Amino acid sequence: MRTIGTAMIAMAMLVGAAFSRAQAASAKENPLQVFIVEDSPVLVLNNVRLIDGTGAPACENVRVDIDHGKIVNVQSSSLRNAFPEGAKVLDLSGRTVIPGLVGMHEHLFYPLPDGGPGLLPLYGEMADSAPRLYLAGGVTSARTAGSLEPYTDISVKDAIDAGKMPGPKLFLTGPYLEGSPAIGPQLHALTGADDAARLVDYWSAEGMT
């Protein structure tokens, strides 16, 4: 009995190790896989409420066909024409579909707690959490409105564009153009117009749009 129990434990350990290796290999091949719930090439979102972003009233009981990431058909669910070949059909009754939101004033940082009298005001970069939270809230494109860690922002954008981390399509704004004194030690206090032009030209060359 002890031998059988030991063998079962060993087998479980081997299976667990194999599963861990498979997970690691999958994550290496596609780091975004852990965030994907539905990955069928062709999807049908059936029986949804649709808000199309034009200002028109919401439409009930709508069917949306998606082929390799592109919406190819929107129609009433009551029409009984055939689903696309090989499609995975999701009954999403009670759910609402909206267009991706475009955030026009976003940041990848957040004020840190006030340290108290005599301590510097600081801002913390949210390189991992901010892009995920925007995307989870439906923001698929975002314009950052000022940067505290510009090189971090550029690296985050590059990683998102390369499919290495989740996040919206980012349009980056450079560091703040601050007078003197700046609002915190993480910002450069400009000395004049020439300094401002130099700063803008530098960060434009580095990739800020």
Image: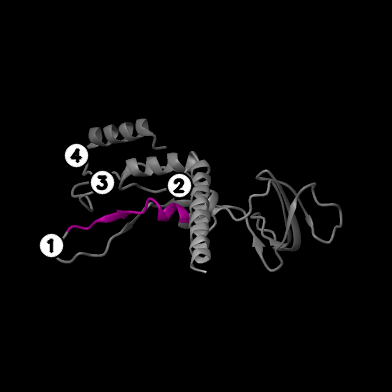
Which of the two marks, 2 or 3, is nearer to us in this view? Answer: 2
Characterize the local packing of mark 4: few (<14), some (14-19) or many (20 or more) Cα atoms within 10 angstroms: few
The quadrant the C terminus occupies is: top left
Type of the residue with mark 3: Glu
Q: Relative to 114, is 154 on the left or the right?
A: right
Amino acid marked by disc 4: Thr
Please say if the residues under marks 4 and 2 sit with CB atoms less than 8 Å apart: no
User: Is residue 130 positioned above or below 60 on the image?
Assistant: above
- Residue 9 x, y percent position in the rendering: 49, 62
Task: Please give the label number shown on residue 178.
Answer: 3
Picture residue at 35% right of the left edge, 41% below the top: 174
Residue extent of the magenta highlight: 120-132
Numbered disc in front, either 1 or 4: 1
Amino acid bearing label 2? Arg
Q: If you read the primary sequence from the N terminus, does the residue marked by circle 2 or circle 3 appear first?
A: 2
Q: Earlier in the sequence, mark 1 or mark 2?
A: 1
